[in-house]
């Protein structure tokens, strides 16, 4: 039983080391693949195609999805 515990501990160490290396490699790939403003540029290009009416509808829907929407005064809407 002690041998099994030692074997399991060694296996666990190698698995943790492998996972740590994979995480580090993934972080490096994430920082090098895309610019930091990647999401902002994507949102800007998507918003450039919308009409004023579509933007107003989008803003209305995002407000309705917010958590405090039903808590505020209902009659003032």
Image: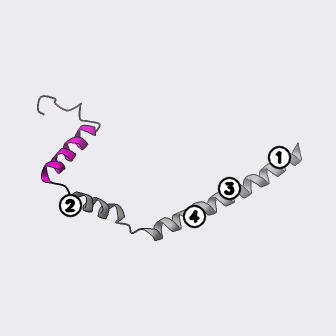
Question: What residue is pinned by disc 1?
Answer: 5
Q: Which portion, as a residue range, is magenta? A: 48-77
Disc 4 vs disc 1: Cβ atoms closer than 8 Å? Answer: no
Within-10-Å neighbours for mark 4: few <14, some 14–19, many 20+: few
Residue contact between numbered discs 4 and 3, judged by CB atoms under 8 Å: no
Q: Position of residue 1 (x, y in %)?
A: 88, 42
Q: Residue at x 23, y 41 (%)?
A: 61
Q: Of helix, strand and loop, which one carries label 2?
A: helix
**Residue that label 3 marks:** 16
Please provide percent x and percent y for residue 50.
19, 55
Q: Which callout, 4 or 3, points at the residue further toward the start of the chain?
A: 3
**Residue 24 shows which numbered tag?**
4
The quarter of the picture where residue 65 lies is top left
Vertical placement of residue 45 versus 60, above or below = below
Outermost residue, top direction? 75
* Magenta run includes residue 62: yes
- Mark 1 vs mark 2: in front: 2
Q: Secondary structure at mark 1?
A: helix
- Kindly state the secondary structure of the residue where label 3 is placed: helix
| Label pair 4/2, CB-CB below 8 angstroms | no
Q: Label 4 vs label 2: CA separation?
A: 36 Å
Q: Which mark, by number, is residue 48?
A: 2
């Amino acid at each position: 039983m002690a041998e099994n515990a030692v074997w399991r501990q060694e296996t666990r160490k190698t698995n943790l080391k492998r996972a740590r290396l994979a995480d580090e490699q993934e972080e490096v790939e994430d920082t090098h693949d895309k610019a930091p403003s990647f999401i902002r540029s994507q949102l800007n290009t998507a918003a450039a195609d919308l009409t004023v009416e579509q933007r107003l509808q989008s803003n209305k829907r995002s407000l309705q999805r917010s958590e405090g929407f039903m808590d505020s005064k209902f009659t003032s809407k």
